[in-house]
Image (cartoon, rainbow, N blue to C red):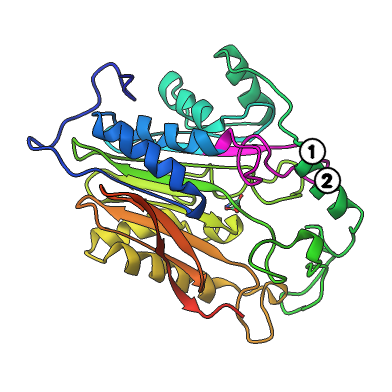
Amino acid sequence: MAQAFPHGAAIARSSTPVKPVAISSANGLRAVTRAMELMREGADALDAVIAGVNIVEDDPNDTTVGYGGLPNEDGVVELDAAVMHGPTHRAGAVASLRNIKNPSRVARTVMERTDHVLLVGEGALRFARAHGFKEEDLLTDKARQAWLTWKENLSTSDDWLPPHKPDDKDIGRNLDPAVLDAFGEYFRHTGTIHCSGLDLQGNMSCVTTTSGLAFKIPGRVGDSPIIGAGLYVDNAVGSAGSTGRGEANLANCSCRMIVEAMRTGKSPEQACLDIVQSIVDHTKLRCLLDDNGRPRFDVAFYAMNVRGEFGGARIYSGGVFSVHDGTEARHHPSAYLYKKP
Ligand code: ASP
C-alpha cells in the first residue's frame, strides 16, 4: 500500500498497535469509513484521510467541495485544500485552484514534491498540470443554477462592502434566502470537509478541502488551506480542523489554538469550545452580529488527541460531526455556545 512518505518517514512510534480513529465534518461519514478501512490495513493516517475526502471531492452532489462545488461570483469554481502529516510535521496546500477536482491530492504533492507549503492560483494549476493532474470543468448544472439565482438577486447579497464604520448594521450583508443554506434563513452558505486520523502506529495527520464560501470574490481564500487556521496537527498532542466562516478562523488561528489547548490537558471538546468563545468575543463588526449581539454566522471545530479522544464544538446548536472509532461510522453531537435562533 502507498505510504505518505515511501522514503521511510512513516514513523512507528508505538510498539503495540494503537486503536485507529477518524473524525470528520458532518458530511464525512463516507470519509471516516474509508479512512478507517485503510488505517486498519496499516495505512499511514495521511493516506487514509486523503482517500476519505477524495470520495466527497468527487461527489457532484456535495456543493461545498471539489467537483460540483459552488463557484465564485464570476461562476468559476475555485478550490482550496491543505494536508498536514504529523510524523514529519510537513504540510502542503493549494488555494484558488481551478479545474482540478482533487485539490487535497495536489496539496499533498506540494508537500512531498516541493520545499514550499502553499501554492496559489495559476501557479498551483501549472504545478498540478506538471504532475499529471487532469483538468476538467468542475461547474455542475446544479451549482451553475444556484450561482445564477444568486447573481440575479445581487446587490444585498455579495461580499463587497461600501465604506462603513464598525458599528454600522445594514451594510449590504445578506438575508436573501437564495444564498442561505441548510441552517435556515440566517447563515451564508458554507461547507467543506475536514478529516483527521490516528493510525495503527499512533501517528496523526489531517486534511481540509473546500470550494470555499459560495459566490466569493474571485481570489478569496478562506481558512481551509491555511495551516493553523483550517487544520493543524502536532503528532505529540493531537489534530484539529474546521469548517464554517473561514474569515473567523483566519483572524483567530483557530486550529493551532485548539491543539495548544489540548497540549495543556484540555479535552478535545473543551479546546474546541474555548476557540468558539474566543471567536465570539473577537467578532466586533456590527454587520456580522444579530440583534442580540451574537454572530450571524457559524463555525465548527473537530479535534482529536493522541489517545484517540475526540470532540467538536460550534457556535450554534444542532450540529454533528462524523466519527469512526472502530465499530461504525456515526454522527456525534457537537457542543455549542448558543441555541440556534
Ligand atoms: N471554511 C471554508 C472557507 O471559509 C468554508 C466552509 O467551511 O464552509 O472557505
Left or right of residue 157: residue 314: left
Q: Are marks 2 and 1 in contact (CB under 8 Å)?
A: yes
Q: Give residue 75's position: percent from left, percent from top.
A: 81, 40
SS at mark 1? helix
Q: Give residue 209's position: percent from left, percent from top.
A: 54, 41
Query: As rendered, which of 277 and 75 lies closer to the eye?
Result: 75
Q: Main secondary structure of the magenta part?
A: loop
Amino acid under disc 2: Gln
Residue lying furthest left in this view? Answer: 15
Left or right of residue 188: residue 87: left
User: What mark, if any, has residue 141 been given in the picture?
Assistant: 1
Q: Residues within 10 Å of mark 1 (few under 14, many from 20)?
A: few
In the image, what residue occupies the spot 62% across and 29% down? Answer: 101
| Distance in Å between CA atoms under marks 2 and 1 | 6 Å
Can residue 85 be seen? no
Q: Which residue is mark 2?
A: 145
Q: Which residues are magenta?
A: 57-81
Residue lying furthest front in this view? Answer: 328
In the image, what residue occupies the spot 47% across and 27% down? Answer: 116
Q: Give residue 276's position: percent from left, percent from top.
A: 46, 69
